[in-house]
Amino acid sequence: MANEIRDLKYWIEEAAPALFLILPTKTSNFPLLETIPEEDDSEDCDNDL
């Protein structure tokens, strides 16, 4: 159990803060999802019957 507490202490003091420092730079490199505008079909249709 002492080993588990030591691992948890390491996680809280070392690993978790490092993730918060790395995470924002990693997520900023991903492109944002963009919505594709719907095309107006009235120009492309051959409705001149």
Image: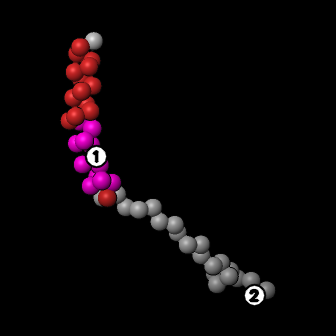
In the rendered view, does 36 fall on the left or right side of 43?
left
User: Label 2, on which residue?
Assistant: 48
| Residue at image point 47% right, 65% down | 34
In the rendered view, does 23 fall on the left or right side of 36?
left
Q: Provide the secondary structure element on which disc 1 rests.
A: helix
Asked whether the beta carbons under mark 1 and mark 2 sit within 8 Å of each other, the answer is no
Relative image position of residue 20 (x, y in whole percent): 28, 46
| Nearer to the camera, 33 or 24 | 24
Relative image position of residue 30 (x, y in whole percent): 34, 57
Relative image position of residue 48 (x, y in whole percent): 75, 87
- Give yes or no for residue 21 being in the magenta stretch: yes
Residue range highlighted in magenta = 15-27
Residue that extends furthest to the top in the rendered view of this protein: 1
Up-down relation of residue 1 to residue 46 (above or below): above
| Nearer to the camera, 6 or 35 | 6
Image quadrant containing the C terminus? bottom right
User: Label 1, on which residue?
Assistant: 20
Relative image position of residue 36 (x, y in whole percent): 52, 69
| Nearer to the camera, 20 or 27 | 20
| Residue at image point 30% right, 58% down | 29
Mark 1, other Cα within 10 Å: few <14 / some 14–19 / many ≥20? few
Up-down relation of residue 18 to residue 37 (above or below): above
Distance between the alpha carbons at the discs numbered 1 and 2: 60 Å
Q: Amino acid at mark 2?
A: Asp
Question: Principal SS element in the magenta part?
Answer: helix
Mark 1 or 2 closer to N-term? 1
Image quadrant containing the N terminus? top left
Residue that extends furthest to the right in the rendered view of this protein: 49
